[in-house]
Image (spheres, rainbow, N blue to C red):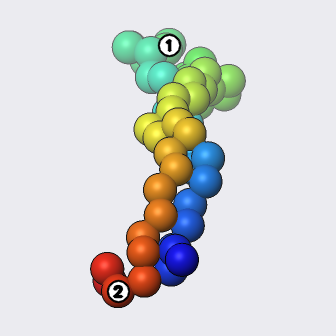
Amino acid sequence: MAMIEVEHLQKNFVKTVKEPGLKGALRSFIHPERQTFEAVKDLTFEVPKGQI
C-alpha cells in the first residue's frame, strides 16, 4: 500500500523573452513574448508506508 502516490505530474514555467535595446525593451513591455517550457513531464511515483 502506497502512502504517497503521484501520477502524471507535470510542471510548466512561463518565461518572458526580452529584446535588446531601448526599442526592444519598450516592445517587450507593451507586447511581451512569452515562452512556455516543461520542467517536469509525466512523472509517476509512489512512496510506500514506512519510507518517510
Label count reads: 2
Disc 1 vs disc 2: which is toward the camera? 2
Q: Is residue 12 visible?
A: no
Which is nearer the N-term, disc 1 or disc 2?
Answer: 1
Please give the residue where the numbered disc 1 appears in the rendered image.
Answer: 23
Q: Position of residue 25 (x, y in %)?
A: 48, 22
Q: Position of residue 26 (x, y in %)?
A: 55, 23
Picture layout, residue 40 above or below residue 31? below
Q: Is residue 31 visible?
A: yes
In the image, 24: left or right of 29?
left
Question: Is 19 in front, or is 21?
Answer: 19
The residue that appears at 35% across and 86% down in the rendered structure is: 50
Crowd rating for badge 2 (residues with CA inside 10 Å; few <14, some 14–19, many 20+): few
Q: Which element type, helix, strand or loop, lies under badge 2?
A: loop
Q: Amino acid at mark 2?
A: Gly
Q: Quadrant of the N terminus?
A: bottom right
Q: Position of residue 41 (x, y in %)?
A: 53, 37
The residue that appears at 44% across and 38% down in the rendered structure is: 39
Question: Is 5 in front, or is 30?
Answer: 5
Q: Position of residue 22 (x, y in %)?
A: 43, 17
On residue 50, the disc is 2
Picture layout, residue 21 above or below residue 41? above
Q: Quadrant of the C terminus?
A: bottom left
Question: Is 37 in front, or is 9?
Answer: 9
Q: Which element type, helix, strand or loop, lies under badge 1?
A: helix
Q: Amino acid at mark 1?
A: Lys
Residue furthest out toward the front: 1
Picture layout, residue 5 above or below residue 16? below
Question: Is 19 in front, or is 16?
Answer: 16
